[in-house]
């Protein structure tokens, strides 16, 4: 009986020891959540490649923003110098127009009056010239006084002034004075486009009376559009005429536009910025005046500790690399990156990567495996 009791006690102790050993074993086999270990098959499929920190010449990028603008000579506000009623127009915003196209027809009674006054002044001038020639002949034969001849000449001069002034008014409304006859007087005038371009705004409708101060249409020639960047005064000294700029908009970050700095303003606005004007090397009709743009400018080139861009993985808004700790085992490490150029990115916190083996090809494969392990 005693032997049976001893056997039971010993068995209980042995079972208890095995259970404790199992717990210890389970504890020691728990892996670090920041470490990924690959099996032989996984390592072969991942095709892991590694590198170390490298010294690369990477330019410092100055990031700017601004918007597309049009030079004043490429933007036309169309108005009628003498006013009038809009009889017809076919313009719509976005429509293309050519220089010399009729873009509107105006009518008003003052156009009739102006042509009438011109023809009367022209007729009076003809009569005054005849009278002056007659008085000059009489004066030559002592049949007329000098005073009468001088008065006739003054009348010729006054009629010339009147006729020329009326002629210039007619040219303002695109009527050629030399083409006017008593049978060609018109109540309507044509408005022509002064540039090749596009209609930006239409501010009138048929039948509306337009004063000389009213802008009927706005036309834009976008061929010479430029990028107007806002630069803080502390950064102006880093820029120069002829410097290259790469521009892009937020909606199409991958679409890059090459520009060149053509003008740097000498004034600083109250907000501490100055204007820098850039010319697009190639015109793109997708670029519209008023569009906001971002721009990158290379301002200096320095030697930096860098890694290939494919080494960097982005996860939850942060950048990481994988460090090889031993064969087929890798640890994820957060890094602070700088500027990128020619497939390399500069690393700011280089002390944690010094003399470390960094994964290049296969970094995202390791990230996916780590996420799956966590899940």
Image (cartoon, grey):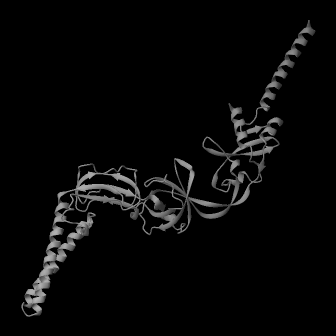
Residue furthest to the top: 1
- Give above or below for 141 relative to 8: below
Relative image position of residue 298 (x, y in whole percent): 59, 62
- Give above or below for 6 relative to 364: above
Q: Residue at x 17, y 58 (%)?
A: 109
Disc tally is: 0
Q: Nearer the viewer, residue 309 or 136?
A: 136
Q: Nearer the viewer, residue 76 or 61?
A: 76
Relative image position of residue 53 (x, y in whole percent): 74, 55
User: Within the image, what quadrant is residue 189 found in?
Assistant: bottom left
User: Within the image, what quadrant is residue 63 found in?
Assistant: bottom right
From this viewpoint, is residue 228 visible?
no
- Give above or below for 192 relative to 14: below
Q: Residue at x 72, y 39 (%)?
A: 365
- Quarter holding the N terminus is top right
Q: Is 52 left or right of 130, judged from the image as shown? A: right
- Quarter holding the C terminus is top right
Q: Is 133 left or right of 331, judged from the image as shown? A: left
Q: Nearer the viewer, residue 189 or 45?
A: 189
Relative image position of residue 170 (x, y in whole percent): 24, 66
Q: Is 51 left or right of 335, judged from the image as shown? A: right
Q: Is 332 left or right of 21, judged from the image as shown? A: left
Q: Residue at x 61, y 40 (%)?
A: 316
Relative image position of residue 233 (x, y in whole percent): 48, 64
């Amino acid at each position: 009986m005693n032997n049976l009791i001893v056997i039971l006690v010993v068995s209980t102790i042995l079972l208890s020891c095995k259970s404790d050993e199992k717990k210890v074993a389970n504890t020691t086999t728990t892996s670090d959540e920041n470490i990924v270990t690959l099996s032989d098959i996984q390592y072969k499929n991942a095709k892991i490649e590694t590198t170390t920190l490298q010294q690369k010449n990477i330019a410092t990028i100055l990031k700017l923003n601004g918007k597309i603008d049009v030079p004043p000579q490429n933007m036309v506000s169309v108005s009628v110098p003498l006013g009038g009623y809009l009889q017809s127009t076919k313009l719509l915003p976005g429509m293309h127009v050519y220089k010399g196209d009729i873009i509107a027809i105006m009518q008003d009674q003052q156009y009739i009056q102006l042509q009438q006054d011109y023809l009367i002044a022209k007729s009076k001038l003809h009569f005054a010239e005849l009278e002056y020639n007659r008085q000059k002949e009489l004066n030559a034969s002592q049949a007329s006084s000098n005073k009468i001849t001088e008065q006739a000449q003054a009348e010729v001069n006054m009629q010339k002034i009147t006729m020329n002034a009326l002629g210039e008014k007619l040219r303002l409304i695109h009527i050629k004075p030399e083409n006017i006859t008593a049978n060609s007087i018109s109540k309507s005038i044509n408005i022509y486009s002064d540039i090749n371009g596009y209609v930006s705004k239409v501010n009138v409708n048929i039948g509306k009376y337009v004063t000389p101060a009213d802008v009927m249409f706005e036309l834009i020639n976008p061929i010479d559009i430029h990028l107007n960047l806002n630069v803080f005064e502390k950064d102006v000294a880093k820029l120069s005429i002829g410097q290259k700029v790469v521009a892009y908009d937020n909606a199409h970050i991958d679409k890059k536009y090459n520009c060149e700095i053509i003008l740097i303003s000498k004034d600083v606005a109250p907000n501490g910025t100055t204007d820098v004007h850039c010319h697009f090397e190639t015109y793109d009709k997708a670029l519209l005046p008023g569009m906001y743009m971002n721009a990158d400018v290379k301002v200096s080139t320095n030697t930096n500790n860098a890694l290939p861009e494919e080494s960097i993985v982005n996860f939850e808004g942060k950048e990481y690399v994988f460090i090889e700790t031993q064969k087929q085992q890798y640890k994820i490490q957060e890094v602070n990156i700088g500027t990128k150029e020619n497939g390399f990115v500069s690393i700011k916190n280089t002390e944690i990567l010094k003399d470390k083996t960094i994964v290049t090809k296969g970094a995202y494969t390791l990230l996916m495996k780590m996420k799956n392990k966590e899940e």
